[in-house]
Amino acid sequence: MLSLKKLDRLFAKYNINPAEDQFLAMLHEAARLKAEVTVPEVEWTPEEMQDALHGKKPLFASRFIHVPREEFLRVFAAIRAVADESIPSGDPCLNIPEPEAFFTQDTLDALAKYPDALWDRIEEAGMDLTLAELYFVPVTAFAMRVFLDDAATEASRAFDRMVPDTVHFKRSITCPVCGTRASMAAVGATQNRGNVKRLYCACCGADWQFERIRCAVCGDEATSELQYVHLEGDDKHRLHVCSACDSTVATVFGAESEDFDPEFESWRCAELMVAYAQTRGQAQKDASKAGNA
Ligand SMILES: [Zn+2]
Ligand SMILES: [Zn+2]
């Protein structure tokens, strides 16, 4: 859940000025804007909740939240402004469509139903996907999140209440609320059940329980194909590496802490991800050299 209070506490604790980092600036602004928007409440039937929990149909696909266009455009402009200001050169990545033309009510409905629909809409608008990924997609995602966050958080707690501790079933790989892929995982100590892993969705803000030893991308459960890597001296931030599908999922340990914030912690995994990508790149180069020799 986006919490301005918690973020401000964390930025103070780590002596960070969010205005100097594009991701943190947008995150902070989204958390601030959440208090300003009014979102009509949506209620799902017990059947819709069950279907979502078991990965059959995400909640938003059954019933989505109405995102009012005027209010969305205002939120989008505010997040865009802080994103632009956070770039030291003062040269924001332009080349984005006119928000008024792009975000029709039909597009907003499509995004509220399934946030990944953004990719299709971007392609339809003839935008460069790689460029869009750098700027337009994150600004849009944070703007949508402002409207979806409360409902997704509430639904996540309702899912938790639906499942007694003793019941085990295969958990959904995609977000039970909005249907997109998890952005990260976290492991936290619990009172009666030891360490529990949860996946987090950056699109809507939902989180849900997941198997500890299972790839969050392909669902593989072979212990031999899954491993954790981390930087020396920091075993709180790790990457769960799956050799079956060649993916990595940022996984944070210590989710039981009061100071745990999924977005902030995923930002703190960036250094590890860069280091891992470099090691992988070097290993591939060495392998191809050996192959050519
Ligand atoms: Zn979601
Ligand atoms: Zn995998």
Image (cartoon, rainbow, N blue to C red):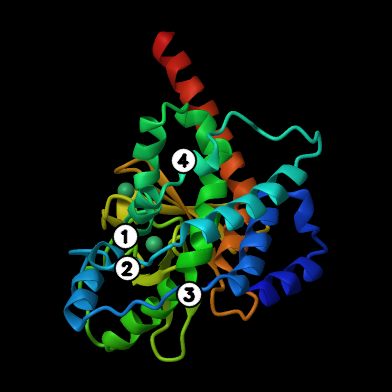
What is the CA distance from the residue labelled 4 to the residue labelled 3? 25 Å
Label 1 crowd (10 A; few <14 / some 14-19 / many >=20): some
Mark closest to the chain's N terminus, 2 or 4: 4
Q: Amino acid at mark 4?
A: Phe
Reading the image, the residue beneath label 4 is 102
From the viewer's perspective, is the residue at label 1 or at label 3 nearer? 3
Q: Position of residue 225 (x, y in %)?
A: 32, 49
Crowding near the residue tagged with mark 3, few <14, some 14–19, many ≥20 C-alpha atoms within 10 Å: some
Element under disc 2 = loop
Would you name the residue on which mark 1 appears? 214
Residue plotted at (32% across, 65% down): 64
In the rendered image, residue 16, in percent from the top left (x then y), is placed at: 79, 60
Instruction: Tell me which amino acid carries mark 1.
Output: Arg
> Which is more foreground, mark 4 or mark 3?
4
Comparing marks 2 and 3, which lies closer to the viewer? Answer: 3
Q: Quadrant of residue 172?
A: bottom left
Compute the Cα span from label 2 to label 4.
39 Å
Q: Earlier in the sequence, mark 1 or mark 3?
A: 3
- The CA span between labels 2 and 3 is 25 Å
Q: Is residue 21 left or right of residue 228?
A: right
SS class of the residue under badge 3?
helix
**Vertical comparison of 155 with 165: above or below:** above
Q: Indicate the quadrant where residue 275 lies.
A: top right
Percent x, y of residue 96: 56, 33
